[in-house]
Amino acid sequence: MLTWNVCATWWIWNSTDVGSVAAFIANSFIMCLPWWGYRVFKRRFGRRTGYVSLILFWMAFEYIHLNWQLSWPWLTVGNVFASNPNWVQWYEFTGTSGGTLWVLVMNILLFDVFKNILARKFAAKQLIVPAAVLVVPLLLSILLIPSVHPKSQTSNVVIAQPNIDPYSKFANDAAGPQVQLLLSLTANAVDSNTRLVLWPETAMTQRGAYEDKLLRYADYQPIFSFLQSHPNITLLSGVEILKNYGPEKVTRTSFLYDGGYADEFNAAVALKNGVPVEYYHKSRLVPGVETLPSFLDFMAPVFEKFGGTTGGYGRQDSSSVLQQPGQPYIAAPIICYESIYGEYVSTYVQKGANILTIITNDGWWGNTPGHKQHLQYARLRAIETRRWVARSANTGISAVINERGDIVETQPWNKPAVLKYNIPALTGQTFYVKYGDILSKIALVVACLFFVWNLVMIVKKRFAPVK
């Protein structure tokens, strides 16, 4: 487990050295728990029951790891097919949990074949079941590949990639020049059919800016002038913003600021001329970096010392969509880390989103596999929801992805760039959007029953009469 964590996510070191070591060790330890359960059940109930328990415990672990306060679903096994979306078009029914099940069953079957070869008990017919388990999902995926919807004839999306150094973009005097750079990229691309402009995570970085005063800040005035000149355009941008609560501490994360309590949010804002400002506050925060789990409050000084956060950003409890009058696109404002949560992303579609808009800042890790993996995961979200994805990344890789997970337009890493594409706004809900991670939930329930069964057997054995 430690080897897997280090080899797959070593790039975290580029943004936090001590934090990455802690993450590698903690995550590796947690990943060992399903294997411990497998060992117990195999010894107590035999090989076959052991294999079943391994599948159940691992899938239950992935679902819990997706939803608790220290979630880190980056290494969910089903993510492995992100670079081969045509293999897993059935994710519109199962999500990544179906891929996890496929990998586990396939490996267990092949492991048994390997053991039989070593024991000189191998027969060719033993390959029939593994071959079927391998081929049937591939054939099903081919049958499920949808026809791509034609481009929109009346609207397009412009995606800006400013390529700003993430370690200097929050300087006190950086907000104004960054806005000018983004506007210059945008203005060169928009046309009369442009309806949505997408800027990356924290593109607007005016220090100490309040939500209810956004229209007053001098650094942002060029944005509002641009929108006045283009009244049909909605700008969806990342923003770091404060919300003032007054004299009372109304949330766990609020802090004393400017004579009262306030929360700071990693947020998305939708701006359109003549329309009230809309915000979405990032809900799924990065543990240790953007938020500290409540059960680790006693370690706040340690996290703060090594570059983490003591209180963390504020957050909203659930997803919400951004929609303005006359706008054909109902946007799902997915901020960075949130895009690896398949079931969470599906809730935007439940609320009416007809396009997935991912805004991110992957430059913290440098030119490593991290930003490439993050891009690939967006392809799975497209399949699960059957929505087009518009992805704006500060340093890259920005992209347009269609509803079957194909990257149809992209811009390279570490380059100021802009994309324009006539993205269709799609409707309808997949089975996965309607019902979520059904396989994981079933596995979690049955895993709990297995645990209770084992507990009952232990109690019966302990209190059984001595013969």
Image (cartoon, helix red, strand yellow):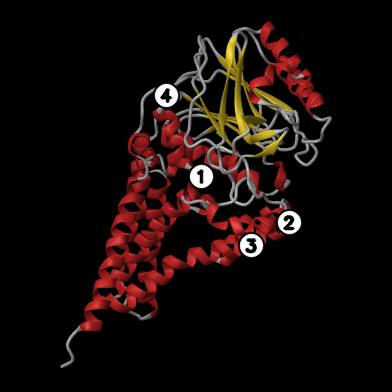
Q: Which of disc 1 and disc 4 is earlier in sequence? A: 1
Q: CA distance from mark 3 to mark 4?
A: 39 Å
Q: CA distance from mark 2 to mark 4?
A: 42 Å
Q: Quadrant of residue 436?
A: top left
* Mark number displayed over residue 22: 3
Q: Is residue 281 above or below residue 183?
A: below
Tag 1: amino acid: Ala
Q: CA distance from mark 1 to mark 3?
A: 27 Å
Q: CA distance from mark 4 to mark 1?
A: 25 Å
* Mark number displayed over residue 82: 1
Q: Secondary structure at mark 2?
A: helix
Tag 3: amino acid: Ala
Does the rendering let one see residue 129?
Answer: no
Q: Which residue is under mark 2?
A: 305
Does 441 sit left or right of 238 as displayed? Answer: left
Dot 4, crowdedness within 10 Å: few (<14), some or many (≥20)?
many
